[in-house]
């Protein structure tokens, strides 16, 4: 934003002085982040801390990172995810895999989620959000168990083929007589 500026003043001798300049202003936008919907899901056998970040300001946050760090007696390893730009009025999802330092401890864990980003003047800003998550024991689905659809589909194919062959033979027998 550019505006002309004129300053008139009298010096110590009573002389009038006028200074005219063009002044440039930079209006820094607002970045107002909120972290919400923090939860744990299981994805492909790996437990993930998920959540969303929304920017309710009027300027994008740049070079965003999400850090998950354990608090207290939790043995969850610290991990990071790069989320790039945090756009205005658009929820930005994050999902960070949970890894344990030592033997896994299931149940409630206190964690701190830190969002690190930069504004348009490249000042680095941190937003901390404390949350309690519940880590469940991995599901014990037996990977060697047989899926019932894998049995039903071949049976249906055999029945369909048999029906087609019987019908074709009857048709051939009728045409032969």
Image (cartoon, grey):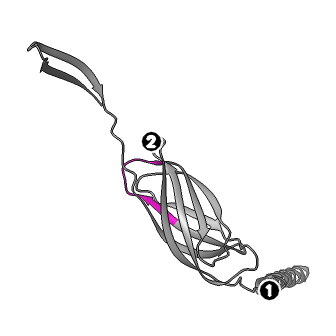
The part of the image, by quadrant, that contains residue 155 is bottom right
Task: Give residue 124's position: percent from left, percent from top.
Answer: 50, 48
> Is 30 located above or below residue 101 in the figure?
above
> Is 149 located above or below residue 56 in the figure?
below
Residue 58 in the magenta stretch? The answer is: yes
Query: Could you tell me which residue is drawn at 56 percent across and 78 percent down?
Result: 133
Q: Does 15 sit left or right of 40 as displayed?
A: left
Residue 89 in the magenta stretch? The answer is: no
Picture mark count = 2
The quadrant the C terminus occupies is bottom right
Q: Which residues are magenta?
A: 52-61
> Is 109 located above or below residue 66 in the figure?
below
Element marked by disc 2: loop
> Is 94 located above or below residue 4 in the figure?
below
Most foreground residue, 68 or 43: 68
* Residue highlighted by disc 2: 120
* Residue highlighted by disc 1: 142
Q: Does 22 sit left or right of 86 as displayed?
A: left
Task: Give residue 145's position: percent from left, percent from top.
Answer: 82, 86
Residue farthest along the front direction in this orientation? 12
Of badges 1 and 2, the one in the foreground is: 2
Query: Could you tell me which residue is drawn at 17 percent across and 22 percent down?
Result: 7
The part of the image, by quadrant, that contains residue 121 is top left
Most foreground residue, 112 or 151: 112
Element marked by disc 1: loop
Residue farthest along the left direction in this orientation? 14
Q: Does 71 sit left or right of 153 as displayed?
A: left
Task: Give residue 3's position: percent from left, percent from top.
Answer: 24, 26
Mark 1 or 2, nearer chain start? 2
* C-alpha separation, residue under disc 1 versus residue under disc 2: 51 Å
Most foreground residue, 5 or 171: 5
Query: Could you tell me which residue is drawn at 80 percent across and 86 percent down?
Result: 142
């Amino acid at each position: 934003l550019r505006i002309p500026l004129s300053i008139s003043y009298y010096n110590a001798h009573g002389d009038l002085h006028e200074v005219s300049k063009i002044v440039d202003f930079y209006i820094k936008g607002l970045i107002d982040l909120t972290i919400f919907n923090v939860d744990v899901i299981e994805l492909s056998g790996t437990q993930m801390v998920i959540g969303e970040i929304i920017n309710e300001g009027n300027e994008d946050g740049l070079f965003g990172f999400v850090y998950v760090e354990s608090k207290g007696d939790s043995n969850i390893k610290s991990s990071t995810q790069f989320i790039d730009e945090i756009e205005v009025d658009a929820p930005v999802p994050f999902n960070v895999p949970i890894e344990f330092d030592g033997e896994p401890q299931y149940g409630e864990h206190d964690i701190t989620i830190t969002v690190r980003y930069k504004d348009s003047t490249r000042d680095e800003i941190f937003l901390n959000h404390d949350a309690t998550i519940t880590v469940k024991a991995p599901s014990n689905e037996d990977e060697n168990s047989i899926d019932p659809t894998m049995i039903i589909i071949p049976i249906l194919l055999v029945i369909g083929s048999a029906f087609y062959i019987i019908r074709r033979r009857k048709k051939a027998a009728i045409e032969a007589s």
